[in-house]
Amino acid sequence: MSAILYTMLSLAGLLQSVHGLPYQTSIQELQSKQPLLDGLPSNTNITLRYVALGVGVQNYTCNGTSYVQTQSSDGALATLYDATSYLASNPSAIGSLSIERLEAYEESQHCEESSNREPQLPTLGEHFFTSDMVPTFDIFEAEPTRKLSAAKIQAVKAPVSDAVSWLYLVDCDDGTSDGLEAAYRVETAKGVAPSSCTSEETGSQVAIAYAAQYWLYE
Ligand SMILES: *[C@@H]1O[C@H](CO)[C@@H](O)[C@H](O)[C@H]1NC(C)=O
Ligand SMILES: *[C@@H]1O[C@H](CO)[C@@H](O)[C@H](O)[C@H]1NC(C)=O
Ligand SMILES: *[C@@H]1O[C@H](CO)[C@@H](O)[C@H](O)[C@H]1NC(C)=O
């Protein structure tokens, strides 16, 4: 009797672990397909949690000669969508998702809701800069919620000239990160400021639409 029960229990356990396997396998496989450029550190010592598609704007302020990101209203403001499962099943879309979503966002006059179609991706949270210019990834729509308050460690020129650079960021250790340790910004689309501005434009801000994939690691 107890032997039968034991067999049934181990069978149930086996089925459960088999059932749990595809997600683990596919996220590990996806991690091995992360786009990288020379100059960005390898991702082999960390564990992928989410691939977040960010769609929004990069803000810049004219300092008299150049557009810079130095004040609190500068930097990125983007909605983060969960592209993890979609890209795990469609890895060939890694190279095209950002620009496709950016074009849909621009066509819909920066209306995110109507640009989130085919595939419709779940919202994960928001990417923004704090008043101290700390790049922050707030994954408040996920269960459990996670957060990364980051410091930029590496930047490498994007393969496309009108796209913002690819980055490697890590927890800035100010005690506000939770459940995330590092992020790569890759597959960037647009977001670059005009190359110069004039002294008459000093203090004026521009918001440049962009999209990027943030590969978030725990
Ligand atoms: C992982 O290793 C690389 C060097 O290969 C290092 O630059 C990076 O900071 C490490 N990442 C973490 C989160 O420890
Ligand atoms: C504006 O920013 C650029 C780039 O950082 C810098 O080279 C330049 O000196 C700055 N100009 C002024 C007027 O501060
Ligand atoms: C960036 O500019 C947009 C559009 O002007 C504005 O809505 C947003 O609040 C600005 N971003 C930040 C971080 O203040």
Image (cartoon, rainbow, N blue to C red):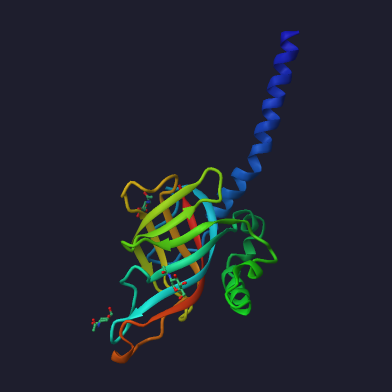
- Dividing the picture into quadrants, the one containing residue 195 is bottom left
Q: Nearer the viewer, residue 177 or 89?
A: 177
Q: Residue drawn 36% across and 61% down?
A: 130
Would you say 142 lies left or right of 61 here?
right
Residue 53 at x, y percent in the picture? 55, 62
Residue 190 seen in the current view: no
Q: Is residue 11 above or below residue 168?
A: above
Residue 105 at x, y percent in the picture? 60, 74
Residue 168 at x, y percent in the picture? 39, 61
Q: Residue drawn 35% across and 79% down?
A: 61
Residue 139 seen in the current view: yes
Please, which residue is most extreme toward the top here?
1
Q: Nearer the viewer, residue 162 or 37?
A: 162
Residue 158 at x, y percent in the picture? 44, 74
Q: Residue drawn 31% across and 91% down?
A: 200
All told, the count of numbered labels is 0
Q: Is residue 200 above or below residue 207?
A: below
Q: Residue drawn 47% across and 81% down?
A: 162
Q: Nearer the viewer, residue 207 or 177?
A: 207
- Dividing the picture into quadrants, the one containing residue 4 is top right
Rendered-image quadrant of the N terminus: top right
